[in-house]
Amino acid sequence: MKQVSIFVDDEKVNQFIELVNNITYIKKFIVVDTNSCLNENIDNIKQGFKELNLIKKGKLKSKSVKDFLNEISS
């Protein structure tokens, strides 16, 4: 199975969804609002910098690389 990404204008997305829902060979269809994903990523990066500054000031304890990798892999 292959994955295809298609970017559709906001005003046409409902029409496109209706079209795709009628195609029988499409196994899975996911709609993602890329604007909200981008905003979420930016917020996560900002939070990371805030935590880094707290660690530098000694107000937050840092984690070892091993603990960090264990946390993100679970």
Image: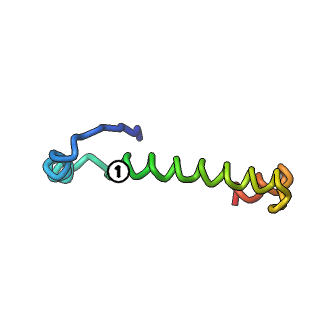
Comparing 59 with 63, the one in front is 59
Comparing 61 with 10, the one in front is 61
x then y, percent, for residue 23? 19, 47
On screen, residue 45 versus residue 9, left or right, reads right
Residue labelled with disc 1:
33
- Residue shown at 80%/55% (left/top)? 55
On screen, residue 6 versus residue 41, left or right, reads left
How crowded is the residue under tag 1: few (<14 C-alpha within 10 Å), some, or many (20+)?
A: few
- Residue shown at 85%/58% (left/top)? 58
Residue 70 occupies which quadrant of the picture? bottom right
Q: Work out whether residue 15 can be spotted.
A: yes
Q: Work out whether residue 28 can be spotted.
A: no
x then y, percent, for residue 45? 60, 48
Q: Quadrant of the N terminus?
A: top left
- Residue shown at 40%/52% (left/top)? 36
Q: Quadrant of the C terminus?
A: bottom right
x then y, percent, for residue 59? 81, 62
Comparing 24 with 58, the one in front is 58
x then y, percent, for residue 42? 52, 47
On screen, residue 65 versus residue 39, left or right, reads right
- Residue shown at 49%/53% (left/top)? 40
Question: Identity of the amino acid at label 1?
Answer: Asp
